[in-house]
Amino acid sequence: MFDKELLKILACPKCKGDLEYIDEPESLVCKKCGKSYEIREGIPILLVEENNDE
């Protein structure tokens, strides 16, 4: 399970925008650029090149 307290210190690696937690599928989405980042076993994968949703 993802610790939502981390949202206070995490930022989008692409544009440095704020991230929002999404339940299904479990991921983080940038409020500024819309890029999404998968969460695997409670760990957000904040690699731009690994999350190809553009």
Image (cartoon, helix red, strand yellow):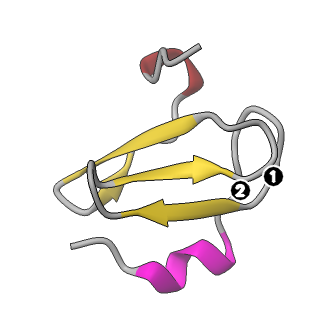
Give above or below for 19 relative to 52: below
Q: Nearer the viewer, residue 44 or 30?
A: 30
Q: Residue at x 27, y 48 (%)?
A: 25
* Callout in the foreground (2, 1): 1
User: Quick one: label 2, few (<14), some, or many (20+) residues within 10 Å?
Assistant: some
Q: Residue at x 48, y 15 (%)?
A: 52
Q: Are marks 2 and 1 in contact (CB under 8 Å)?
A: yes
Quick check: 48 left or right of 52? right
Give above or below for 21 relative to 39: below
Q: How many marks?
A: 2
Residue 14 falls in which quadrant of the image?
top right
User: Residue 43's spot in the image, x, y percent?
Assistant: 31, 57
Quick check: 5 left or right of 15? left
Q: Nearer the viewer, residue 34 or 5?
A: 34
Amino acid on which disc 1 is placed: Gly
- What residue range appears in magenta? 4-9
User: Residue 9's spot in the image, x, y percent?
Assistant: 68, 73
Amino acid on which disc 2 is placed: Ala
The residue labelled by disc 2 is 11
The chief SS type of the magenta part is: helix
User: Residue 5's spot in the image, x, y percent?
Assistant: 51, 86
